[in-house]
Image (spheres, grey):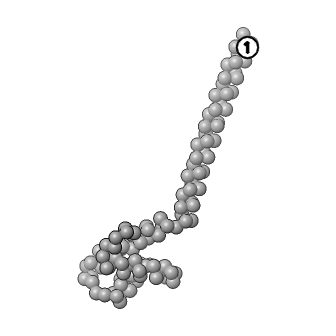
Amino acid sequence: MPTEILNELFEVVVSVCDNLYASKELINKKTVKNLVLLHAEWPDSELEAQIPKYINQWRLHNLTLDSEIQGSAEIHRLEEQLSNYRSDLLHAKQIIAKLRTELRGMLDA
């Protein structure tokens, strides 16, 4: 979430999403809209346009804070690095084998 609060509707949507998440309830546009309307009234067109955007911002923010996802990304990065090291090692072994063959050829000549 941005450090500055965008507006009151944004604040209410974030609060509603946090509460729904804490109580392990479904977070969707209809549920959030109904709960937002308990706090204040906004034009329906604004709710229809802003609620999905604010829910997605809330979800993205939570994903960036999720240590399990961050840990998963770190594991993926390390696995990729390990794969690169294995590839480099294989390439080095091939070069060593080629050089040995060339050296034997030179010694035998």
Q: Is residue 106 left or right of residue 71?
A: right
- Say left or right for 18 vs 108: left
Total labels: the figure holds 1
Question: Which image quadrant for residue 99?
Answer: top right
Residue drawn 62% across and 34% down? 91
- Is residue 26 visible to us here? no
Q: Is 64 above or below relative to 80? A: below
Side (left or right) of 76 relative to 57 = right
Q: Amino acid at mark 1?
A: Leu
Q: Residue furthest front?
A: 3
| Residue occupying the point 34% across, 88% down | 39
Tell me what residue is drawn at x 44 percent, y 68 percent.
61
Residue identified by numbered label 1? 107
Question: Residue 44 placed where, x, y %?
Answer: 27, 82
Task: Determine the image quadrant of residue 45.
Answer: bottom left
Q: Is residue 84 above or below residue 97?
A: below
Q: Position of residue 7 (x, y in %)?
A: 30, 76
Residue beneath the point at 43% across and 67% down? 60
| Above-or-below relation of 71 to 80 | below
- Helix or strand or loop: what does disc 1 sit on? helix
Q: Quick one: 42 or 31, which is closer to the camera?
A: 42
Is residue 9 at all visible to an observer of this figure?
yes
Question: Of all residues shown, which one is farthest toward the top?
Answer: 109
Image coords of residue 104 (percent x, y): 72, 18
